[in-house]
Image: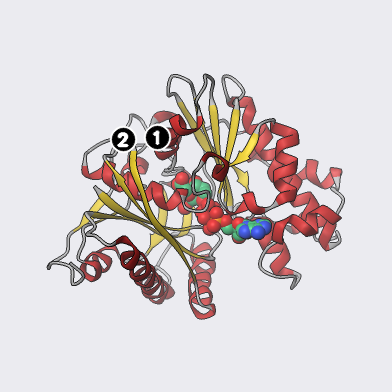
């Protein structure tokens, strides 16, 4: 199947999309990929939906802004498809759509992604698989992380030799997948990745993120604050576990200079990943780092010191910025084939389970 996967992550920077050819077991061909940044207006509307979603917290009437945010998100998805389909030069069989998470409360079986898969299917003229977290949650899973099944499919491209491999995604939130030599999967969210650093930098008017980790590189880690942050009960919880982007706050680093605060939050991300190692049966031989955080040189240096062999996904011929989008395509294919999306070791779901909803177009696509 030729499948287009979409992901709009917790960083609220825009929409990633990638086309792959897959049989739901492996990737046969990597097609084109594209990122579309939100316009300022779109970011404002979608950001407001996230803000009001947090305040709403799943109780009472759904915030009305979700409708406008969903429409804005839809426009970005269509613009992105326009770029990709021009480059693709062929028909699509399927689309995998994630949507924008506005609230994630796994302890209450609640995960809310805005977006409109029905409209996307009509406008693209292609079947769309969405809602891939829901069957998992209905069966006792965390509903996240979803990407581990795809990490497992990529592992043979990384693991030429024996031994476990870990995939580490550094987005707003960090999630890890440990792939044992026998294919055993252990996955969970480790803690924040870049989300807190972004919040800090934005709140102090110093840009959108700590570009290349330059601020953190000039700062000094405050050990006492770092220890206090690592005292959060999330780190004592055994997996399965997953996070909302806003489960942690930057308030403890408020008294610090921007550079020291960035250094301390960067160390917080790294130490949270290091703590994750405690639950692996064996240390990973290699860490494959995906997501925007791998562009943060200070974070990458600190991870390598702490974890050993730790390299960007691109070093293995993978597209580190598009792995989540590719995963949505891969999972959509698996959904159509009735194959499991999640496993007891990845989300805590009762048994390996498929999932996803299907939206069908009423007419053939105009671009065919
Ligand atoms: N050059 C860079 N230097 C430092 N950090 C960077 C750089 N480029 C991107 N980032 C970080 O990566 C983040 C975006 O990463 P990514 O797109 O993987 O996140 P996401 O997919 O939105 O989040 P999640 O995986 O939690 O859903 C940015 O918010 C920024 O913090
Ligand atoms: C609820 C939600 O959207 N979670 C995201 C978030 O961003 C990273 C991490 O937290 C991961 O659990 C998940 O995204 C990826 C796509 C996943 O489910 O694997």
Residue of label 1: 153
Label 2: which secondary element: loop
Residue at 63% over, 28% down: 277
Residue that mark 2 sits on: 25
User: From what the image shows, is residue 65 above or below residue 241?
Assistant: below
Does mark 2 have its CB less than 8 Å from ligand 2? no
Which one is nearer the viewer's eye here, 63 or 83?
A: 83
Up/down of 311 relative to 82, above or below: above
Q: State which tag comes first along the sequence, 2 or 1.
A: 2
The image shows residue 162 at horizontal and vertical percentages of 52, 19
Question: From where the camera sits, is residue 253 visible?
Answer: no
Q: Residue 355 sits in which quadrant? A: top left
The image shows residue 39 at horizontal and vertical percentages of: 51, 77
Determine whether label 2 and label 1 are within 8 Å by CB.
yes
Furthest residue toward bottom: 41
Q: Quadrant of ligand 1?
A: bottom right
Q: Residue at x 54, y 68 (%)?
A: 51
Q: Where residue 142 sits: x, y (%)?
A: 44, 41
- Location of the C terminus by quadrant is bottom left
Task: Tell which residue pokes out farthest to the left in this image.
Answer: 363
Residue 315 at x, y percent in the picture: 57, 41
Task: Kindly state the secondary structure of the residue where label 1 is placed.
Answer: helix
Left or right? Give the position of 189 relative to 193: left
Residue drawn at x 21%, y 54% is 93
């Amino acid at each position: 199947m030729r499948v287009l996967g979409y992901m709009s992550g917790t960083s609220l920077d825009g929409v990633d999309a990638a086309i792959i050819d897959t049989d739901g077991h492996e990737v046969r061909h990597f097609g084109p990929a594209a990122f579309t940044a939100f316009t300022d207006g779109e970011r404002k509307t979608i950001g407001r939906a996230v803000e009001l979603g947090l305040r709403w917290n799943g109780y009472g009437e759904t915030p009305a802004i979700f409708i406008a945010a969903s429409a804005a998100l839809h426009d970005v998805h269509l613009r992105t498809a326009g770029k990709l389909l021009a480059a693709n030069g062929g028909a699509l069989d399927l689309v995998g759509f994630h949507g924008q998470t506005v609230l994630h409360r796994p302890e209450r079986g609640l995960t809310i992604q805005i977006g409109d898969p029905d409209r996307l299917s009509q406008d693209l003229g292609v079947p769309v698989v969405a809602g891939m977290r829901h069957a998992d949650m209905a069966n006792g899973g965390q509903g996240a992380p979803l990407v581990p099944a795809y990490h497992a499919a990529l592992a043979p491209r990384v693991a030429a030799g024996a031994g476990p491999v870990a995939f580490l995604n550094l987005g707003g939130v960090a999630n890890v997948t440990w792939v044992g030599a026998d294919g055993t999967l252990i996955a969970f969210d480790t803690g924040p990745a870049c989300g807190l650093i972004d919040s800090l930098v934005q709140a102090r008017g110093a840009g959108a993120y700590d570009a290349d980790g330059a601020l953190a590189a000039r700062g000094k880690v405050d050990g006492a604050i770092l220890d206090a942050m690592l005292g959060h009960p999330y780190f004592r919880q055994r997996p399965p576990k997953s996070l909302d982007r806003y489960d942690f706050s930057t308030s403890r680093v408020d008294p610090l200079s921007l550079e020291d605060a960035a250094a301390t939050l960067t160390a917080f991300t790294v130490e949270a990943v290091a703590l994750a190692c405690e639950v692996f049966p064996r240390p990973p031989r290699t860490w494959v780092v995906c997501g925007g955080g791998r562009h943060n040189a200070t974070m990458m240096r600190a991870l390598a010191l702490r974890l050993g062999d730790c390299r960007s996904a691109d070093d293995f011929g993978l597209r580190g910025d598009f792995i989540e989008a590719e995963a949505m395509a891969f999972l959509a294919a698996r959904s159509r084939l009735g194959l499991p999306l999640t496993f007891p070791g990845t989300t805590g779901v009762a048994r390996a389970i498929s999932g996803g909803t299907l939206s069908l177009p009423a007419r053939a696509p105009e671009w065919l």
